[in-house]
């Protein structure tokens, strides 16, 4: 590499001056002059010191990039100076070369142990001096390039952390908003109690449970599970909550006004079919969802339901017997013109109906496998003495015990209707 190329390479690392700053430490004035003259000809910025103490003072003011220090000096020798040089705080690495007439391996090892990077034997040959300085320059250049890269990485990580914190705060607020979609977790009616559970696996999720009163004796109850997880799924649950609104019945797709502010509920299968059309025609989304929609007659206990790919509704009779009912069906939002079947059951006093997401039945067991339908039926039987929110809380606790983890891999939701 010619002198011009060397200077260009140095300027990229050592600033616009393009000079490596070298400190020569030697008690021999003649030796300093010889080394200094040789190095200045090669384009280096050279400073001299006649003792280790003077060299340390210079290093405090302006730390050099590279040090050439004689080993044998009165007072503080080169080895002690090297140790103190290494103990100094500095932003960049300083390369240290010891000048010595010592050639024993033990002496070289002691020098390396005390912080020296390289050795030059005295008398110093100009070509060897140039080669050792060039090698040190490469090390310094690589170290500073690495430091620059680390600073860029650190800055980038700091910016990413800021973005993550902002996103995390937004997700926390989004979780609060999604939880607010289920405004009431418990409602007592004249002949039934309704309890709701909504527990996303992350900040936000794709599950939704809710209800909407139709009249004094009629009630709509639904359980929904949107495909996927995260923000996009949560946004879709918010849209669906609007379609099944409690506060604005005129916008609820399940209701029809009969006059004078009175409403009736459409057959559940027809409502699910309408939602299927709305998703395919009005929502530009790759998501689909499963659901169960129930039309509950609070006076007679008759419950009409439509199931669209959602887990089978569970009925527990007053005597403790547990059964799964339903027709299965296709998810909503996959096929145009999909048809959904309707089925019904009758709840007697003491019976209860559980609508739940597959986050429960597909909850993994610690020993392998899943909770599955049989496991849920056993849990329901074991918890038959509990009611309402206590039942749902105990159900979640048992799932956590069996899975061996507090956080579940999927959203968990349920609606429990107990006919009294």
Image (spheres, grey):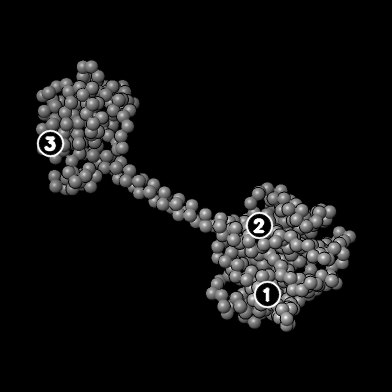
Q: What residue appears at the point 56 percent right and 75 percent down from the top-left corner?
A: 283
Image position, residue 92 (x, y; %): 30, 38
Q: Nearer the viewer, mark 1 or mark 3?
A: 1
Q: CA distance from mark 2 to mark 3?
A: 73 Å
x, y percentage for residue 84?
A: 30, 25
Measure the alpha-carbon separation of dots 2 and 1: 26 Å
Give the mark nearer the N terminus: 2 vs 3.
Answer: 3
Query: Residue 90 at x, y = what percent?
Result: 30, 34
Q: Which residue is mark 1?
A: 249
Q: Quadrant of residue 58?
A: top left
SS for tag 2? strand
- On the rendered image, what quadrant is the C terminus found in? bottom right
Which one is closest to the eye, mark 2 or mark 3?
A: 2
**Whether residue 184 is situated above or below residue 16 in the rendered picture:** below
Q: Helix, strand, or loop for circle 3?
A: helix
Mark 1 surroundings within 10 Å by alpha-carbon count, few (fewer than 14), some (14 through 19), many (20 or more): many
User: Residue beneath label 3, please?
Assistant: 40
Front in this rendered view, residue 129 or 318: 318
Q: Earlier in the sequence, mark 1 or mark 3?
A: 3
Q: In the rendered image, which quarter is residue 413 located in?
A: bottom right
Res 199 label? 2
Q: Are marks 2 and 3 in contact (CB under 8 Å)?
A: no
Residue 67 located left or right of residue 289: left
Q: Nearer the viewer, residue 311 or 185?
A: 185
Query: Can you say whether 382 is above or below 312 in the image?
Result: above
Q: Residues within 10 Å of mark 2 (few under 14, many from 20)?
A: many
407 to the left or right of 166: right
Give SS at disc 1.
helix
Q: Is residue 100 above or below residue 220?
A: above
Of the pair 205 and 170, the residue shown nearer to us: 170
Distance in Å between CA atoms under marks 1 and 3: 89 Å
Q: Disc 2 vs disc 1: Cβ atoms closer than 8 Å?
A: no
């Amino acid at each position: 590499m010619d002198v011009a190329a060397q200077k260009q390479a140095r300027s990229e690392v050592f600033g616009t001056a393009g000079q490596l700053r070298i400190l020569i430490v030697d008690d021999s004035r003649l030796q300093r002059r010889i080394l200094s003259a040789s190095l200045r000809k090669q384009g280096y910025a050279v400073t001299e010191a006649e003792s280790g103490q003077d060299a340390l003072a210079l290093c405090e003011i302006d730390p050099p990039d590279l040090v050439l220090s004689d080993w044998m000096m009165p007072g503080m020798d080169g080895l002690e100076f090297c140790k103190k040089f290494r103990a100094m705080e500095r932003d960049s690495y300083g390369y240290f070369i010891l000048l010595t007439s010592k050639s024993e391996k033990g002496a070289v090892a002691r020098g390396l142990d005390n912080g020296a990077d390289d050795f030059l034997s005295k008398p110093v040959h100009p070509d060897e001096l140039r080669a050792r300085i060039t090698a040190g320059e490469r090390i310094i250049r690589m170290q500073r390039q690495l430091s620059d890269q680390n600073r860029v990485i650190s800055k980038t990580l700091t910016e990413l952390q800021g973005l993550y914190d902002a996103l995390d705060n937004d997700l926390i607020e989004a979780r609060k908003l999604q939880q607010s979609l289920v405004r009431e977790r418990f409602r007592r009616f004249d002949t039934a109690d309704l309890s709701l559970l909504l527990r996303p696996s992350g900040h936000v999720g794709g599950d939704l449970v809710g209800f909407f009163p139709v009249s004094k004796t009629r009630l709509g109850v639904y359980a929904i599970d949107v495909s996927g997880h995260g923000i996009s799924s949560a946004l879709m649950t918010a849209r669906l909550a609007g379609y099944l609104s409690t506060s604005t019945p005129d916008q609820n797709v399940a209701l029809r006004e009969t006059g004078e502010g009175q409403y009736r509920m459409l057959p559940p299968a027809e409502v699910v079919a309408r939602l299927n059309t709305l998703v395919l025609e009005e929502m530009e989304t790759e998501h689909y969802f499963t659901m169960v929609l129930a039309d509950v007659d609070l006076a007679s206990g008759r419950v009409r339901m439509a199931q669209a790919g959602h887990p089978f509704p569970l009925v527990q009779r007053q005597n403790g017997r547990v059964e799964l009912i339903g027709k299965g069906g296709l998810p909503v939002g996959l096929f145009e013109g999909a048809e959904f079947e309707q089925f019904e059951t009758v709840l007697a006093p003491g019976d209860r109906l559980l609508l739940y997401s597959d986050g429960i039945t597909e909850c993994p067991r610690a020993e392998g496998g899943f909770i599955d339908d049989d496991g849920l039926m056993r849990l329901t039987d074991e918890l038959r003495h509990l009611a309402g929110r206590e039942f749902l809380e105990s159900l979640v606790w048992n799932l956590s015990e069996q899975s061996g983890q507090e956080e579940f891999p999927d959203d968990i939701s349920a609606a429990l209707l107990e006919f009294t």
